[in-house]
Image: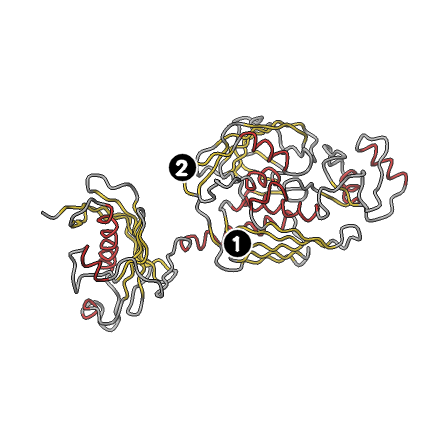
Amino acid sequence: MDANFNPDKQHTLASVTGISGTGLHTGIKVDMTLKPASAGFGFQFQRIDLPGQPIVKADCDLVTDTSRGTTLEDNGAKVSTVEHILAALVGMGVDNCLIEINGPEVPIIDGSSQPFVEIIEEAGVMEQDATKVWYSIDANISHYDEKKRVEMVVMPAIEYKITTLIDFNSPVLGTQHASLKSMREFKDEISPCRTFCFLHELEMLLDHNLVKGGDINNAIVVVDKPVTPKEMERLAKAFGREKIEIKSEGYLNNLELRFPNEPARHKLLDIVGDLALIGYPIKGQIIANRPGHSTNVEFARKIKQYIKKNKHLKNAPVYDPNQAPVFTTTQIEKTLPHRFPFLLVDKIIELTDKHIIGVKNVTFNEPFFVGHFPGNPVMPGVLQIEALAQTGGILCINLMPEGQYDTYFIKIDNCKFKNKVVPGDSMLLKMELLSPIRRGICEMRGTVYVGNKIATEADLMAQLVKRS
């Protein structure tokens, strides 16, 4: 991500790239190809070695196993150890990519994301003509696993930031933490960090004929107990080496750490990869204590459910009465022909070439309350639509050549009234252009918000006519 990288645009690869290697647990050699994909595609794996070449979407709801990495399964296809390639894609700012693979497991290479980062750099990252819609976390979302003593929380923040803490009661590892303050740091600070395991875990995996693709250089092995010469011989044989040694710091293989806290940094890498399965790019600060794949995925599911439940709020406008309006009522009257009692917009607080936000303060003194449900005043829905239309009219007239214009309804579609508007409410009227204005015809999406709730929404079409 260079200085010209626009984080508010979607990105894909500029060209096809690939890598080959062995799966850590299956020992199967696979070829993996990364291909550009269209905007909104997301990350999808395709098992090109299976009949029909089934596709498995990178989605936390499709995770079926987290015992030795993160496994996705759908359409009769399975792809394991997906976290390192997903972390590399997210870390390099890629939003859309088709990942073709001719085997059941992503190659482990050196146990980090760095080899994947390198091939992504080689292919290039290309900006797409599509907005990247971030979901800004607006409330603390927590996950706690009492059995595993894992605590995870995401809090509101203006960027995507992660802090990881690990404490496995190991005299070798001790207590470590790692932080990622910006995704721009991922390439240099996080991607080189390799996976790790404890010697007793490695022995258990060997006993079960797993880690068939294990190699001396693709995992950090922590030795926190005495090891007999016989055990050392067995490990040497398993890794195809004549001799294996234990460093004084308690790591196997004379492996030089790339960072003093490389294990904690790799846990952070795993979080980036596993949370890519949410399916939405988020802005928030994550703090994770003793995370693992199972809790990462559970946390991803919790965040995804929260976003789906509150997704309609992500575009809810915010009204600060201390800010000067873009248009006052006096200025609105110079643009629109409407007057009391039919001028239904008090001020405009935001205006671009694509959208506009107006404010209508509803009081008990509105003339329509006299006859509309006396004793139970409710603002008529048709007047809410009219308020939207007047707000949209200001946007459209502002985009037309100089002159005076009137706007006339042509069509109203998909109109829904979801919540009552009553005296004391402040209506925020948001209108968004669905397409450029052509021959005076404008199509807009309108939404009435009261606080964070949607009261009314509709698709409106109108014609702008210049006054003679």
Q: What residue is rendered at 55% in x and 55% in y?
A: 285
- How crowded is the residue under tag 2: few (<14 C-alpha within 10 Å), some, or many (20+)? few
> Between 339 and 233, which is closer to the camera in this rendering?
339
Give the quarter of the image for residue 223: top right
* Residue 253 in picture, x, y percent from top left: 80, 38
SS under mark 1: strand
* Residue 197 in picture, x, y percent from top left: 74, 44
Per the rendering, the mark at residue 332 is none
Residue type, numbered disc 2: Asp
**Given contact means CB atoms under 8 Å apart, are the residues at marks 2 and 1 in contact?**
no
Which residue lies under the disc numbered 1? 284
* Residue 150 in picture, x, y percent from top left: 66, 56
> Between 164 and 376, which is closer to the camera in this rendering?
164
Give the quarter of the image for residue 347: bottom left
Q: Is residue 284 above or below residue 259?
A: below
> Between 26 and 37, which is closer to the camera in this rendering?
37
Which residue lies under the disc numbered 2? 129
Residue type, numbered disc 1: Gly
- How crowded is the residue under tag 1: few (<14 C-alpha within 10 Å), some, or many (20+)? many
Task: Check the image and name the residue furthest to the right.
Answer: 229
* Residue 461 in the figure: left or right of residue 174: left
Q: Earlier in the sequence, mark 2 or mark 1?
A: 2
